[in-house]
Image (cartoon, rainbow, N blue to C red):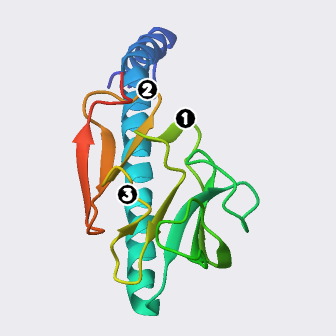
Amino acid sequence: MGYRQKGLTLIELMVTIAVLAIVVAIAIPSFNTLIANSRALSTGEELISALNYARAESIKRGDRVTLCGTTNGTACNGTWANDWIVVADDAATDDAASPVVGGVLRFWVGPKKGAAVTEAGAATFVRFTRKGTLGNSGGGTITLTAAASGCSGNSARQVTVGIAGVLSGQRTTQGCS
């Protein structure tokens, strides 16, 4: 009977580690892009969720409800890059220049690291009237774009709130490189 080897030689182990290192070096950039694409998608979906919640609450309550950015969780004093809150809006009219917080209904953590939400105009909040239509919309619609640094192709999400309060979300290359 001959001798049977149990285990690996040092050369076999070194070749296996070298092949593994090459495969990992090739996979990491693709993995980073996958993470950025997923981050853009999840930010867009969170935005749509927040807008749908605000609209549903406005219809349910029969009163104005607003989604806005916040820096402290209690006031509409932030931008889309900050955390978001949905508030009962006690503004005098549907077209008031800024929301008047009557109470915070729900809080969302803002975009994650590397993700961003931008607005095509200058809207810092989205107000829904008691009927679920868009209030304070001089331009007729509000368009928000959720993207992440490092995303590729059409992985960003563009969310449009129409004058009737209807949301539409679509893929876009805006914000992705």
Camera-nearest residue between 161 and 51: 161
Where the C terminus falls, by quadrant? top left
Please indicate, yes or no, whether residue 70 appears anywhere in the rendered image. yes
Label 3: how many Cα within 10 Å (few below 14, some 14–19, many 20+): some
Number of numbered labels in the structure image: 3
> Which residue is depicted at the point 30% across and 68% down?
165
> Which residue is depicted at the point 61% across and 79% down?
90
> Residue 98 vs residue 154: left or right?
right
Question: Disc 3 or 2, which lies upstream in sequence?
Answer: 3
Give, as a three-letter code, the residue at label 3: Glu
Disc 3: which residue: 45
Badge 3 vs badge 1, beta-carbon distance below 8 Å: no
Against 99, is 106 above or below? below
Question: Disc 1 or 2, which lies upstream in sequence?
Answer: 1
Camera-nearest residue between 44 and 158: 158
Q: Measured from the top left, where is residue 33 in percent x and y?
A: 38, 29
Badge 1 vs badge 2, beta-carbon distance below 8 Å: yes
Label 2: how many Cα within 10 Å (few below 14, some 14–19, many 20+): some
Q: Nearer the viewer, mark 3 or mark 2?
A: 3
Camera-nearest residue between 39 and 93: 93
> Residue 117 vs residue 100: left or right?
left
